[in-house]
C-alpha cells in the first residue's frame, strides 16, 4: 500500500515528464487536475477489479429495504448469521424459474437499495453484506502557503494495476490540452484537400487509453455478482 503524496504523485512527475529538469516547480498538469484524473481512473478500474469489503446491512423501517454503502459498486454475497445461511441474488435472466419448493431466500439490488424477499424487521443486525466497492478517492486541501495537504492520502489500487491507472490518468490529463489544441487549429485545417486533423495531444491520449486496456486485460477480472 502506498500514498498519493509520496508514491503515485511523484511517479506522475516522471510519467508525464512534468517539471523534470526545469528551473521552475510550476506543473504543466496541476494538482487538482491530477487528483481528479486519478480518481476517475480508479473508478474505471472498478469495472475490472474493484475493492472487496464487508459491512452489516442496515435495514429500513419496512423491514425489507437495506441502504447500500456509499462506496458500493456491486454485490457479492449476503450472509444471515442468525439463521446461519446465505441469501441468494435473484436471477432475472429470460427462461429462469424458481422451484416452488426452493426455500433459499432471495434479494435484489435497485439503485442504492437492496430489497429483501422477506421482512426481517428493522432491528435486524445479523445480515452481513460482502460487496465490491469503489476505491477511496484521493482528497486534497490548498493551504495558505499554496501547498497541498491530503486528508485521504492512501492509495488502495493493487500494485499490478498502478501502471494501468497511470496510463488512464495521463489520458485524462491530456484531454484539456487536446481540446485547446483542436480549438486553436480548427481554422487551419483544409477540409477540401482532405488534410487530416493533426493533434499530438489527442494522439498521445489515445495511446495511453489503449495501454490501459492492454494492461488490465493481462489479468483476469475479479469474480463479481450482477446487481442490475
Image (cartoon, grey):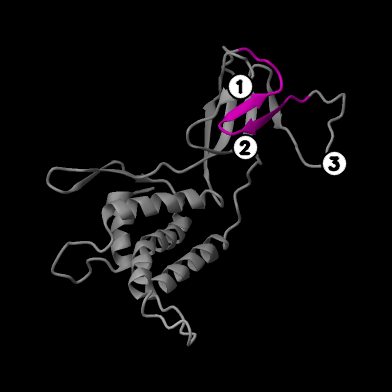
- Kindly identify the residue that appears in the image at 61 percent across and 21 percent down: 65
Q: Label 3, label 2: how many angstroms apart (C-alpha)?
A: 23 Å
C-beta proximity under 8 Å, tags 3 and 1? no
- What is the magenta range? 104-121
Look at the numbered disc 1 and give the secondary structure of its residue. strand
For disc 2, the marked residue is 76
Q: In the rendered image, which quarter contains the C terminus?
A: top right
Look at the numbered disc 2 and give the secondary structure of its residue. strand
Q: Earlier in the sequence, mark 3 or mark 2?
A: 2
Q: Which of marks 3 and 1 is nearer the N terminus?
A: 1
For disc 1, the marked residue is 65
User: From what the image shows, is residue 226 above or below residue 37?
Assistant: above
User: From what the image shows, is residue 117 above or below residue 156?
Assistant: above
- Kindly identify the residue that appears in the image at 60 percent across and 49 percent down: 222
- Percent from the top left, x then y, of residue 77? 64, 33
For disc 3, the marked residue is 95
- Percent from the top left, x then y, of residue 39? 40, 49
C-beta proximity under 8 Å, tags 3 and 2? no
Q: Label 1, label 2: how many angstroms apart (C-alpha)?
A: 17 Å
- Relative to 183, 66 lies left or right: right
Residue toward you, 217 or 2: 217
Residue toward you, 197 or 40: 197
Look at the numbered disc 3 and give the secondary structure of its residue. loop
- Kindly identify the residue that appears in the image at 65 percent across and 15 percent down: 120
User: Is 79 in the magenta?
Assistant: no
Q: Label 3, label 1: how many angstroms apart (C-alpha)?
A: 27 Å
Amino acid at each position: 500500500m502506498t500514498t498519493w503524496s509520496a508514491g503515485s504523485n511523484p511517479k506522475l512527475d516522471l510519467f508525464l515528464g512534468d517539471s523534470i529538469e526545469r528551473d521552475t516547480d510550476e506543473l504543466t498538469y496541476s494538482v487538482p487536475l491530477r487528483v481528479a484524473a486519478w480518481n476517475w481512473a480508479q473508478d474505471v478500474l472498478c469495472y475490472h477489479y474493484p475493492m472487496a469489503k464487508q459491512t452489516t446491512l442496515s435495514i429500513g423501517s419496512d423491514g425489507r429495504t437495506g441502504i447500500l454503502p456509499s462506496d458500493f459498486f456491486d454485490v457479492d454475497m449476503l450472509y444471515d448469521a442468525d439463521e446461519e445461511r446465505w441469501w441468494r441474488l435473484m436471477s432475472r435472466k429470460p427462461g429462469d424459474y424458481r422451484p416452488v419448493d426452493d426455500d433459499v431466500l432471495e434479494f435484489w439490488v435497485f439503485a442504492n437499495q437492496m430489497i429483501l424477499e422477506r421482512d426481517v424487521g428493522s432491528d435486524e443486525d445479523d445480515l452481513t453484506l460482502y460487496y465490491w466497492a469503489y476505491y477511496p478517492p484521493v482528497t486534497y486541501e490548498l493551504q495558505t502557503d499554496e501547498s497541498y495537504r491530503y486528508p485521504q492520502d492512501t492509495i488502495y489500487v493493487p500494485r499490478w494495476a498502478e501502471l494501468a491507472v497511470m496510463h488512464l490518468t495521463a489520458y485524462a490529463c491530456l484531454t484539456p490540452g487536446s481540446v485547446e489544441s483542436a480549438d486553436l487549429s480548427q481554422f487551419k485545417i483544409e477540409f477540401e484537400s482532405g488534410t487530416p486533423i493533426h493533434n499530438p495531444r489527442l494522439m498521445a491520449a489515445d495511446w495511453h487509453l489503449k495501454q490501459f486496456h492492454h494492461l488490465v486485460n493481462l489479468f483476469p477480472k475479479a469474480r463479481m455478482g450482477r446487481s442490475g
